[in-house]
Amino acid sequence: MRELLRSNDVVLVSYVVDLLGQEGLSAEVFDGHMSILEGSIGAFPRRVMIDADDEMRARRLLNEAGLREHLADG
């Protein structure tokens, strides 16, 4: 798995996962339950992870969607 995006914005994370899913790519959200441990203040960003084989396609899709600035370095 490769990190595609890291954000505290739960709406952005949901949008990205849905966008990828519409294109047949399966993404996982890591650290989504950390808010339970840290008191829901959003201190720990969620990570969108993608299979290494799908990484380039996913990056291209997010770039085309205007989300380039949110992509993790890769």
Image: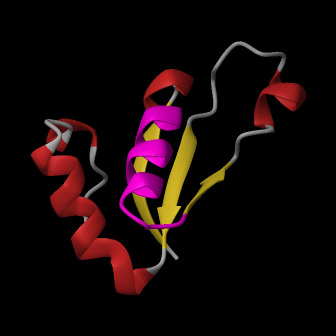
* Residue 10, quarter of picture: top right
Q: Residue 74's quadrant in the figure?
A: bottom left
Q: Residue at x 37, y 87 (%)?
A: 53
List x then y, in percent, for residue 15: 44, 34
Q: Residue at x 16, y 61 (%)?
A: 60
**Closest to the observer, 52 or 73:** 52
Task: Say whether residue 14 is left or right of residue 39.
Answer: left
Q: Is residue 20 inside the magenta stretch? A: yes
Against 2, residue 42 (above or below) is above
| Visual colour scheme | secondary structure
Is residue 38 rendered to the left or right of residue 26?
A: right
Position above or below: 22 against 52: above
11 over 45 or under it: above or below: above
Residue 24 percent coordinates (x, y): 43, 67
* Magenta range: 13-26
Query: Is 72 on the left-hand or right-hand side of 40?
Result: left
Q: Is residue 63 above or below residue 51?
A: above
Count of marks, rendered view: 0
Q: Residue at point 78% right, 36% down?
A: 34
- Residue 40: quarter of image: top right
Whether 3 is among the magenta residues is: no
**61 with respect to 46 (left or right):** left
Residue at left offset 88%, top offset 27%: 36
Outermost residue on the right side: it is 37
- Magenta region's main secondary structure? helix
Residues 11 and 8: in front is 11
Kindly give the residue lying farthest to the bottom in the view shown.
53
Picture coordinates of residue 38, whole percent (x, y) = 81, 25
